[in-house]
Image (tube, rainbow, N blue to C red):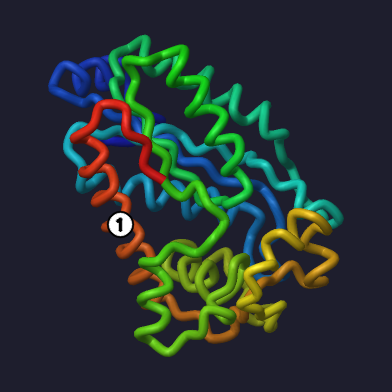
């Protein structure tokens, strides 16, 4: 039976819940620039793929349709941006959670592939802890930094962290080559802003991405490979499963 809600009928969903489905993963992406070579949907594609992979190894787990709009004002100045304020996204998450709980879901996993969603995720989780205390909420991918699992693979394959990048670099480009190669324009890929400076994120939040990198790229996508992208995705899936398995031992634990 499908685990993907948008492909299911309501009797399918009711049957899945009766059979023990208690968890829904809500993928959160964004609609924003990812350099001249990746589509605006990059984060949404990645979030959906990670959610479906994670559901495949977690019994009793369903996947909701991805939310394609995130908190992306740091990308202002680039064409194509569609985004939400932090409070708006938090409210949308809370509204969705109320409906999910209404038909029997006991755990909601918020899986974000866009670092800019972090504040909204925190606000939503705090509100849900007050409003729906019986609903367990877990947050995956809530930070702006590259995951340790991905950094470890890159290091093992001699990809510098500065090339891996925080946005549209080798990491995201390799993942998109694995997931949707038809949407990747590798002939347009160019090195972007490559830096390991710990103050880079603060500068981005203060000045916006366009002030730091005119192409919108943080990293160097030119060496991206689909095979390495698959390894990045598998590592993130394994890390997410480990965190959720640990969170399951505590009824209100929030993983991040």
Write the residue at 54% across / 48% down. 44
Query: Is 31 placed above or below 184 here?
Result: above
Can I make out residue 31 in this image? Answer: yes
Is 195 left or right of 45, judged from the image as shown? right
Is 174 left or right of 234, judged from the image as shown? right
Q: Residue furthest left?
A: 19
Is 19 left or right of 222, judged from the image as shown? left
Where residue 38 sits, quadrant-wise, is: bottom right
Q: Residue 208: horizontal and vertical position, in percent? A: 80, 58
Q: Quadrant of the N terminus?
A: top left
Q: Residue 155: horizontal and vertical position, in percent? A: 40, 83
Write the residue at 63% across / 69% down. 198
SS for tag 1? helix
Write the residue at 27% across / 43% down. 244
Q: Residue furthest bottom?
A: 158
Q: Residue 62: horizontal and vertical position, in percent? A: 30, 33
**Residue beneath label 1, please?**
239
Can I make out residue 1 in this image? Answer: no
């Amino acid at each position: 039976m499908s685990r993907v809600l948008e492909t299911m009928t309501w009797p399918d969903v009711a049957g899945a819940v009766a059979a023990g489905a208690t968890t829904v993963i809500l993928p959160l992406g964004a609609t924003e620039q990812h350099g001249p070579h990746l589509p605006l949907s990059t984060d949404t594609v990645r979030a959906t793929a990670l959610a479906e992979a994670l559901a495949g190894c977690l019994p009793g787990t369903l996947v909701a349709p991805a939310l394609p709009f995130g908190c992306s004002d740091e990308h202002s100045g680039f064409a194509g941006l569609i985004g939400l304020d932090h409070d708006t996204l938090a409210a949308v998450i809370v509204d969705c959670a109320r409906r999910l709980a209404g038909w029997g879901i006991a755990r909601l996993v918020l899986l974000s592939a866009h670092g800019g969603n972090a504040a909204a995720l925190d606000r939503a989780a705090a509100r849900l802890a007050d409003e729906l205390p019986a609903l367990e909420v877990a947050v995956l991918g809530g930070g702006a930094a590259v995951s340790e699992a991905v950094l470890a693979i890159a290091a093992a394959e001699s990809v510098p962290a500065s090339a891996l990048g925080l946005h549209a670099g080798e990491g995201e480009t390799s993942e998109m080559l694995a997931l949707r190669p038809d949407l990747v324009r590798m002939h347009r890929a160019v090195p972007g802003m490559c830096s390991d400076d710990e103050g880079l994120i603060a500068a981005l939040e203060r000045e916006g991405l366009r002030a730091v990198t005119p192409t919108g790229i943080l990293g160097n996508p030119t060496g991206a490979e689909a095979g390495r992208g698959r390894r990045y995705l598998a590592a993130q899936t394994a890390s997410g499963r480990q965190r959720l398995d640990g969170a399951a031992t505590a009824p209100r634990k929030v993983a991040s």
